[in-house]
Image (tube, rainbow, N blue to C red):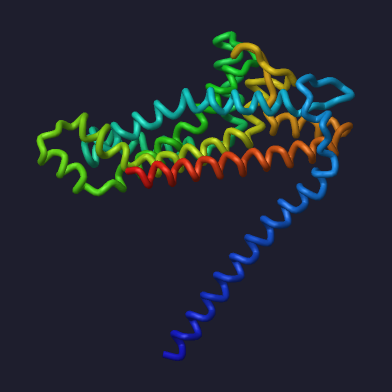
């Protein structure tokens, strides 16, 4: 009994130590960014036009929003419908399903720079799109597709079978059951995957340098080059001429991520409460 109590205290101490270290690192990083960046948040940084004297982040902010929306429009329908097939229609235990799942998990672990090189060779060069918003969005959609597929499939599998059996018992067909019963119940879990995908899109740099380019302007069409906030911050830091503005951009990027996560969480809670 005494040995068991000692083990419990030891494991509890390790858990608390790990939690405190994690929170401490997070607070240090956030505090460092805020202390270095907030003093350089000036109105000129939010101008619609970028030039060598005024390194405005507004074009990059708008390009980030456009890149995120375009990537989600491409990836979310493909990922969700693929997960519906794997979870609801594919034969359980089939070899094809196992191969698809292993492939998706493998693609999730590939470094983003490899996606960027693929996008440059295929979308930029082979298809002739050049450095453009569209090439970057397609590259990012391929990158986040495995994440959306896996989280959506897990959300669908988490729906109790009683929902399906009850729908079938009332005479509903397979398609009606999937899209009117199972899918609405899995929406909170699907949204969780989409939130993770948004975070990866907003913070991505390597893949976009090779596909979307680094032109600091508001794109007027999907075929124009654009830089996102993360690429903008990388460009300012690598040039070494506007490092302070780079820290200010990091503050805005942090605020954008927090805002997106907060709004998405509220949407998920509201949808979950209405189901």
Q: Nearer the viewer, residue 62 or 23?
A: 62
Residue 271 rendering spot, x and y as whole percentages:
39, 41
**Identity of the residue drawn at 85% across and 44% down:** 39
Residue 43 rendering spot, x and y as whole percentages:
82, 31
Residue 126 rendering spot, x and y as whole percentages:
56, 11
**Identity of the residue drawn at 54% across and 41% down:** 263
Residue 164 rendering spot, x and y as whole percentages:
19, 42
**Identity of the residue drawn at 52% across and 37% down:** 197
The quarter of the image holding the C terminus is top left
Q: In this view, does 214 lie to the left or right of 45?
A: left
Q: In the figure, residue 19 lies in which quadrant? A: bottom right
**Identity of the residue drawn at 49% across and 44% down:** 266
Q: Nearer the viewer, residue 5 or 218?
A: 218
Total of numbered circles in the picture? 0
The quarter of the image holding the N terminus is bottom left
Vertical arrangement, residue 66 with respect to residue 145, above or below: above
Q: In the figure, residue 103 lies in which quadrant? A: top left
Q: Is residue 264 left or right of residue 84?
A: right
Vertical arrangement, residue 40 with respect to residue 78, above or below: below
Q: Which of 154 and 182 is in front in this view?
A: 182
Vertical arrangement, residue 223 with respect to residue 73, above or below: above
**Residue closest to the far bottom:** 2
């Amino acid at each position: 009994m005494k040995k068991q109590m000692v083990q419990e205290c030891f494991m509890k101490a390790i858990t608390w130590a790990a939690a405190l270290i994690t929170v401490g690192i997070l607070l240090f990083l956030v505090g460092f960014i805020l202390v270095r960046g907030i003093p350089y948040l000036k109105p000129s940084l939010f101008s619609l036009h970028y030039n060598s004297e005024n390194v405005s982040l507004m074009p990059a902010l708008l390009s980030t929003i456009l890149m995120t929306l375009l990537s989600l429009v491409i990836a979310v329908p493909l990922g969700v419908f693929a997960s519906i097939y794997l979870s609801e229609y594919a034969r359980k235990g089939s070899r094809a399903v196992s191969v698809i799942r292993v492939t998706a998990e493998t693609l999730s672990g590939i470094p983003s720079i490899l996606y960027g090189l693929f996008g440059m060779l295929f979308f930029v060069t082979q298809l002739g799109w050049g450095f453009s918003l569209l090439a970057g969005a397609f590259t990012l959609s391929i990158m986040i597709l495995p994440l959306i597929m896996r989280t959506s499939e897990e959300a669908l599998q988490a729906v109790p079978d009683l929902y399906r059996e009850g729908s079938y018992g009332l005479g509903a067909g397979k398609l009606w059951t999937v899209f009117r019963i199972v899918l609405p119940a899995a929406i909170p879990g699907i949204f969780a995957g989409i939130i993770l995908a948004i975070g990866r899109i907003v913070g991505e740099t390597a893949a976009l340098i090779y596909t979307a380019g680094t032109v600091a302007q508001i794109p007027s069409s999907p075929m124009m080059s654009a830089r996102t906030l993360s690429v903008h911050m990388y460009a300012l830091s690598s040039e070494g001429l506007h490092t302070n503005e780079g820290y200010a951009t990091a503050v805005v990027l942090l605020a954008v991520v927090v805002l997106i996560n907060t709004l998405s969480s509220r949407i998920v809670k509201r949808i979950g409460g209405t189901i």
